[in-house]
């Protein structure tokens, strides 16, 4: 198993290198001059040319790429011209907020999908058939509704029309002061320091963005759990187990083991997709995470910031896929055999 | 035997199920707290002398040498004190105000006396106020102004434009002479009508503490550019200092105790970043924030009449200009008749009524309607919407069957896109097929300013200084950077140069009329409309003035 993990970790290096190259190339091909964006429409061509020289934008692209890679090795992702700060600092400040938001949403999505999906998949009666229909309609709705639109509706209904939610700005009430900075995640830091006022305010602020992400993203996983479990329950070995009079609990266990791999794969992929989903949700709720940062970077041709966000998203995706592989290997020993760990 | 430290699959499922039950419970607990917490936050934010403004983006820089957005401009106008400021008068009975663009009535701020010019019109004498301290505690001296214009000259970025239009001496020569601590003389190359009016423009001739700035300079950065971007607040003399700036979240401005005109009434002003305009609307309705801007016309309409909300639709003090720029350097727009045909076809009133829903005025001119010397009689296209005349001109130009070209739109300006769609459908009737190309702001600016667009572009720009020479140079001088249409005419260049060097009077007025007549006839761009400055605010907020920069002076605001 350790060898298997080692091999997968070693694969991360060329993958990251390739992603660095592609993100570098894409940002260079994207229309928009960084120097012009910094200086604006009233600046002279001379001033623009001077700034391009200072930024090294006139160097051949292999030289620029080499300089960029050298910076990454030294832990320097460049400076964001829109915030005036190091990109690494900017991302370190914002990434915990995004990761926390998508992780909490993901946990709720998985909890709902597993509870409802398993209930529907294992039991067939009138109630679950109604549940099937509701689930189908909900899936259609959730698939058709854009997340930013749903976020706006949620704000309108729960904040303005029926004022039961807190103002959809930020992660907690600024008037309470800042929580001690340990991990950067307000939830974790407030829990660790037992800062109850901030913790409660933060949970209040989490509800609407999490609700938005959960509503939009639960449907596909729920349907996958239901169909995967249902398929297992209809398989030949379950029929055999039933015919042999095995207890229901044991039968469910067998079915679940067989149903888990596709669910885990989809869940992992969906976690990485939540990063993209969080971009607009963060914008609606002014969450202050990397999603908002990425949008501003695109608008302002802030290439250093954009490349930093792409690298973070890529690294996170690769780590999640690694975790999926490890979970697969753990659940299904055949994966380890094929992976060559024995 | 199983290792007790390793989680078995069965245990994993059990724990997963337990979490599935526990998490919704946690959510329920959180929900139960929500209502009371929300109410508490709203009431606390409304109490005390704090003004909260929801903005779409926070300040990016306090260095005026670089491109700045609306929040940066507002920050600079409150951190840095202007030399003079326009006086103002009430705007209807709204509690808000509009400026008077009469240099004879303006208020002296950092200047102690009216600027005087020598008999030959070349040397201006500025006398600075005594007893003014910067946020770093250094006294205001004449050398601060000398440092500011020298910095323009050496950094040679945006400041180079201001030095040029003000008529200062060429870059290699020194325009200033410090007479004593209070007095400075500035020399221009030719008589400059713009020098005086530019004194009110904080981005052209705003002052900052040269001692603090010089102390932050390094050998690699002799003009302290990096320091100024983030820490420029320390060099200001204005009514507010920046006490907190968290990119992506908020900027906090705190009243400056030693402000020379007395400490401002509002102690704290917060710029809160709220990216989504619909969220800004909801926050204003609930009273969570006091002022919002950058809303869509439909959102503004929805706020009119909302309880506790006032929408200031400033249909005076118009400085924003909406153009449809035509690339005069490419076919078919290198033909004046084609440009005139479009000017006849565009439905100006429909843009104002249907797209802007009354939050804009028809322009019908080439400089802002509120500029001195605006000449309404120069306009020859009436209300537009005249396809018959447009077809005639297209036929004369050899384009009877019309043509197809690109129309660039800036994606960060959603109203511009609506205008573009309206124009697209109108011009289709005369055979012109416009292909909409929506670009991110940076890409749009790059293509527009580099004149790398194939046809037309919807572009809005703010001409900050109410002077015809300033405006005409900016957009129509063949060598100007903002002449994004690529318009070039020797005759109009001569008229622009004359407007930049002729002092106010009948000669300048006649030149201004002739210039406007020629530009309307040549129609290098289509002058679509003038969007209003619109502020949506809680009714407890009074005293907002519609300055040309479309920024709020926090020290003028009163909270009921």
Image (tube, rainbow, N blue to C red):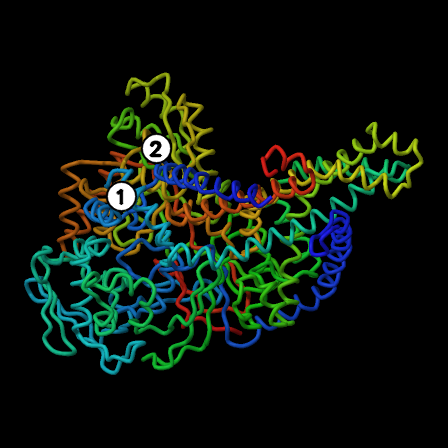
Q: Label 1 is found on which chain of the structure?
A: A
Near-viewer residue (B151 or A313):
A313
Locate residue B350 relative to residue A156 in the image: left or right: left
Locate residue B97 relative to residue A198 in the image: left or right: left
x, y percent for residue A317: 54, 43
Locate residue B5 relative to residue B518 in the image: left or right: right
Work out whether disc 1 and disc 2 sit on a shared chain.
no
x, y percent for residue B407: 38, 32
x, y percent for residue B137: 29, 80
x, y percent for residue B481: 23, 44
Q: How many marks?
A: 2
Q: Is residue A226 visible?
A: yes
Residue at figure coordinates x 54%, y 45% from the top left: A319
The quadrant holding residue A87 is bottom left
Name the secondary structure under disc 2: strand
Image position of B447 with respect to A184: above or below: above
Residue A111 numbered tag: none
Residue at figure coordinates x 42%, y 45% from the top left: A298
Name the secondary structure under disc 1: loop
Residue A57 numbered tag: 1
From the viewer's perspective, is the residue at label 1 or at label 2 nearer?
Answer: 1
Q: CA distance from mark 1 to mark 2?
A: 28 Å
Say which residue label 2 marks. B456
Near-viewer residue (A211 or B12):
B12
Q: Quadrant location of the N terminus of chain A?
A: top right
Residue at figure coordinates x 60%, y 73% from the top left: B44
Locate residue B250 relative to residue B326 in the image: left or right: right
Q: Label 2 is found on which chain of the structure?
A: B
Instruction: Say few, some or many: other residues with alpha carbon within 10 Å of mark 2 (under 14 / 14 to 19 / 20 or more).
Output: many
Contact check, label 1 and label 2, Cβ < 8 Å? no
Near-viewer residue (A278 or B59):
A278
């Amino acid at each position: 198993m350790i060898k298997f993990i080692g091999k997968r970790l070693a694969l991360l290096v060329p993958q990251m290198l390739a992603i660095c190259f592609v993100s570098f190339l894409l940002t260079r091909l994207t229309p928009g001059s960084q120097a012009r964006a910094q200086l604006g429409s009233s600046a002279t061509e001379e001033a623009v040319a001077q700034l391009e020289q200072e930024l090294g934008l006139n160097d051949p692209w292999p030289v620029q790429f080499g300089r960029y890679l050298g910076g990454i090795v030294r832990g320097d992702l460049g400076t964001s011209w829109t915030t005036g700060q190091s990109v690494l600092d900017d991302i370190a400040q914002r990434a915990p907020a995004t990761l926390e938001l998508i992780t909490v949403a993901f946990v709720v999505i998985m909890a709902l999908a597993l509870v409802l999906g398993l209930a529907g998949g294992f039991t067939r009666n009138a109630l679950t058939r109604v549940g099937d229909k509701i689930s189908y309609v909900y899936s259609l709705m959730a698939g058709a509704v854009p997340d930013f639109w749903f976020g706006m509706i949620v704000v309108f209904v729960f904040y303005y029309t029926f004022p039961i939610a807190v103002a959809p700005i930020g992660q907690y009430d600024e008037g309470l002061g800042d929580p001690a900075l340990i991990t950067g995640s307000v939830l974790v830091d407030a829990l660790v320091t037992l800062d109850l006022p901030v913790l409660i305010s933060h949970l209040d602020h989490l509800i609407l963005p999490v609700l938005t992400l959960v509503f939009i993203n639960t449907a596909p996983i729920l349907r996958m759990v239901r169909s995967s479990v249902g398929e297992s329950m209809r398989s030949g070995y379950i029929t055999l187990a039933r015919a042999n009079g095995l207890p229901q609990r044991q039968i469910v266990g067998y079915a679940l083991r067989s149903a888990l791999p596709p669910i885990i794969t989809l869940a992992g992929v969906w976690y990485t997709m939540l990063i993209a989903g969080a971009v607009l949700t963060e914008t609606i709720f002014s969450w202050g995470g990397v999603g908002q940062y990425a949008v501003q970077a695109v608008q302002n041709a802030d290439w250093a910031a954009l490349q930093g966000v792409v690298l973070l998203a890529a690294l996170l995706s690769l780590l999640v896929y690694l975790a999926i592989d490890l979970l697969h290997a753990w659940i299904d020993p055949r994966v380890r055999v094929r992976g060559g760990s024995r | 035997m199983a290792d007790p430290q390793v989680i078995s699959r069965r245990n994993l499922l059990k724990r997963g199920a337990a979490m599935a039950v526990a998490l919704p419970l946690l959510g329920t607990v959180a929900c139960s707290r929500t209502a009371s917490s929300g109410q508490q936050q709203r009431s606390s934010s409304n109490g005390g002398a704090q003004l909260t403004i929801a903005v779409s983006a926070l300040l990016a820089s306090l260095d005026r040498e670089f491109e700045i957005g609306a929040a940066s401009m507002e920050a600079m106008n409150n951190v840095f004190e202007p030399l003079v400021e326009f006086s103002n008068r009430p705007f209807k009975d709204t509690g808000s105000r509009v400026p008077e663009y009469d240099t004879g009535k303006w208020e002296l701020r950092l200047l102690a006396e009216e600027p005087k010019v020598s008999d030959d019109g070349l040397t201006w004498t500025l006398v600075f106020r005594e007893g003014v301290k910067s946020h770093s505690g250094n006294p205001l001296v004449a050398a601060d102004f000398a440092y500011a214009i020298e910095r323009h000259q050496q950094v040679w970025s945006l400041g180079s434009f201001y030095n040029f239009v003000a008529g200062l001496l060429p870059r290699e020569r020194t325009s200033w002479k410090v007479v004593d601590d209070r007095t400075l003389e500035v020399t221009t190359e030719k008589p400059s009508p713009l020098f005086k009016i530019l004194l009110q423009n904080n981005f052209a001739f705003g002052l900052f503490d040269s001692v603090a700035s010089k102390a932050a300079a390094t050998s690699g950065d002799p003009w302290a550019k990096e320091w100024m971007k983030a820490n420029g607040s320390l060099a200001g003399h204005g009514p507010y200092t920046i006490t907190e700036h968290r990119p992506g979240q908020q900027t906090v401005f705190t009243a400056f105790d030693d402000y020379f005109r007395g400490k401002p009434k509002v102690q704290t002003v917060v710029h809160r970043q709220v990216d989504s305009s619909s969220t800004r609307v909801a926050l204003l309705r609930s009273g969570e924030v006091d002022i919002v801007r950058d809303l869509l016309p439909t959102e503004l309409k929805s706020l009119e009449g909302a309880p506790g909300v006032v929408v200031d639709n400033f249909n005076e003090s118009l400085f924003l200009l909406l153009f449809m720029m035509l690339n005069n350097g490419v076919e078919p727009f290198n033909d004046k008749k084609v440009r005139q045909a479009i000017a006849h076809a565009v439905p100006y009133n429909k843009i104002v009524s249907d797209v802007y829903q009354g939050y804009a005025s028809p322009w019908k001119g080439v400089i802002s309607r509120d500029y001195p010397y605006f000449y309404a009689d120069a306009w020859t296209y009436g209300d537009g919407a005249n396809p018959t005349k447009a077809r005639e001109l297209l036929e004369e130009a050899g384009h009877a069957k019309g043509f197809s070209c690109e129309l660039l739109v800036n994606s960060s300006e959603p109203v511009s896109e609506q205008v573009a769609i309206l124009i697209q459908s109108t011009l289709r009737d005369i055979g012109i097929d416009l292909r909409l190309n929506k670009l991110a702001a940076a890409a749009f600016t790059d293509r527009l300013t580099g004149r790398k667009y194939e046809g037309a572009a919807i572009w809005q720009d703010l001409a900050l200084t109410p002077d015809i020479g300033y405006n005409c140079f900016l957009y129509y001088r063949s060598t100007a950077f903002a002449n994004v249409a690529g318009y070039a005419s020797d005759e109009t260049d001569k008229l622009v140069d004359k407007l930049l060097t002729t002092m106010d009077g009948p000669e300048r007025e006649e030149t201004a009329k002739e210039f406007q007549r020629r530009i309307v006839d040549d129609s290098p761009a289509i002058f679509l409309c003038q969007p209003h400055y619109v502020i949506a605010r809680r009714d407890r907020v009074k005293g907002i003035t519609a300055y040309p920069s479309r920024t709020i002076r926090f020290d003028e605001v009163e909270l009921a």
